[in-house]
Amino acid sequence: MRIFGTVVRTLSLSRSPLLRAPSRLFSSLPAPDEVRSAPFPQQVKFGESVVAALDDPSTKPVLDAMFQSSDGIRGFFVSYLTSPEPPSPSAASIPPLLSAALSSVSDPADIVELSIMNLIMPTAMAVTYANAPPPEDPDGPMEGSNESMSASSSLTAARARPVLLAVAALHPSLARSEIALLLQSVSSPSPGDRWSDFCDKWGYGSGELAAIEAALRGVLAEMPAADEPVVGFRRDVVEPGGERRPKRGETVTVQCTGYGKNGDLSVPFWSTKDPGGEPFSFVIGTGSVIKGWDLGVAEMGVGETARIFCDAEHGYGASGFPAWGIEPNSPLIFEIELLSSS
C-alpha cells in the first residue's frame, strides 16, 4: 500500500468552500463495508463525517475501515487537516481514535512518509501564498486574499505537526531517518533522489525550503531524545523489489548513501550519487564489506531499496573510519538500492 505524495493536490484546495468545514451530507456514518470499497473522492466525503464524529467511540469501526486502504487514509486526512477545529497542541492530545488508527497501518514507511508530506506541503504553501502577487480574480473558485490563503495553509500545517509527532513516536528510527533524508535533499539537492525530485517538481524556492527545514527540525527537537537504540542491524524496506535474493559469492551492485558523519545520523558521509560517483559492486558473503552490508543486502530482492541500521559491531567498530568522518563505535544508517546480483 503506497500512499506517498497523494494528498498534496487536494490539500491545495483547503480554502475551497467544499472543504472548509465537515459537511452534513451524511446524517449518519457510512457502514464499514461501504467505506472499504469506496474510491478516493467518496472517501473524502466519508472523511468529513468521520472527522466530525471523532469523539464518538462508535466511529471506530468506520475509521478503522478507512485506514485499511490508501484511498481511505488519504480521504481521511484531506478532511482532518482542513477541518476548522483548532489543531491539537501536541501528539498526546490528538483524538484517541486517530492515535489507534495510526498504529494500525500495515506499512510503517507509508504512514511516516505521508505524515511528513502532510506537514511540508502546507508549510511550503504558506510561504508561496505569502510571497505571491495578488490574485487576478479574488472572487474565483479559490477566493480569498493571499494573506488568508497563507494563514489557512499554516493552520493545515499546525494540524499535521502533532500527527507526525504521533507517528514518529510509533516508528522513531524510521521517522528520524526519513526526515534526515529530506533535510539532506533540502540542503544539497541531488537529481534522482526522490525528495530532491519532489521539491523540484513542486517548484520550491529558497523560502519554501527554509520553511520546510525549520518545520522538520522543530519536529526532531520535540521527539524524545532517547530514540530506540540501534542494536545489531535492521533492514526497513523502502521500495520492494523482486523475489530473487543474492547468493553467497555473487557480485552485487548497489546505489548507496551512508549517514552518520561525526556521530550525526542525519549527515551523509558518502554516496554513490555524489558528483563523480558510480554504483558500487562487491562479492556478497565473503567479508569484503562491513558485516551490516553483508547481512542486510543478502536479505534484499533485486530492485529493492532499503534502509539498513547498523550498530558499531556491524559497521566500522571501535576504530571508526576517520577519512569519512565516522567516529569510533558509531551507529550508521545506509539507504541501499540493490541494482543487480549475478
Image (tube, rainbow, N blue to C red):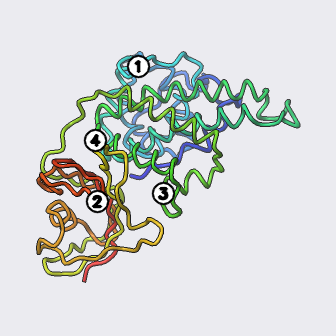
Residue under label 4: 173
Q: Is residue 62 visible?
A: no
Quote the CA–CA distance across marks 3 and 2. 28 Å
Circles 1 and 4: CB atoms closer than 8 Å: no
Q: Is residue 202 visible?
A: yes
Most distant residue in the bottom direction: 342
- Check disc 1 and give the amino acid type: Ser
Of circles 1 and 4, which is in front?
A: 4
In terms of sequence position, does the residue under pointer 1 or pointer 4 come before the other? Answer: 1
Q: Residue at x 17, y 64 (%)?
A: 290
Quote the CA–CA distance across marks 3 and 1. 29 Å
- Check disc 4 and give the amino acid type: Ser
Residue under label 2: 323
Task: Relative to 188, say whether 27 is above or below.
Answer: above
Most distant residue in the front direction: 323
In the picture, residue 20 is in which quadrant?
Answer: top right
Of circles 3 and 2, which is in front?
A: 2
Task: Relative to 296, say whether 277 is above or below.
Answer: below
Quote the CA–CA distance across marks 2 and 4. 26 Å
Quote the CA–CA distance across marks 1 and 2. 42 Å
In terms of sequence position, does the residue under pointer 2 or pointer 4 come before the other? Answer: 4
Residue under label 3: 194
In terms of sequence position, does the residue under pointer 3 or pointer 1 come before the other? Answer: 1
Residue under label 1: 90
Label 3 crowd bin: few (<14), some (14–19), many (20+), radius 10 Å = some
Classify mark 3: helix, strand or loop.
helix
Circles 3 and 4: CB atoms closer than 8 Å: no
Classify mark 2: helix, strand or loop.
helix
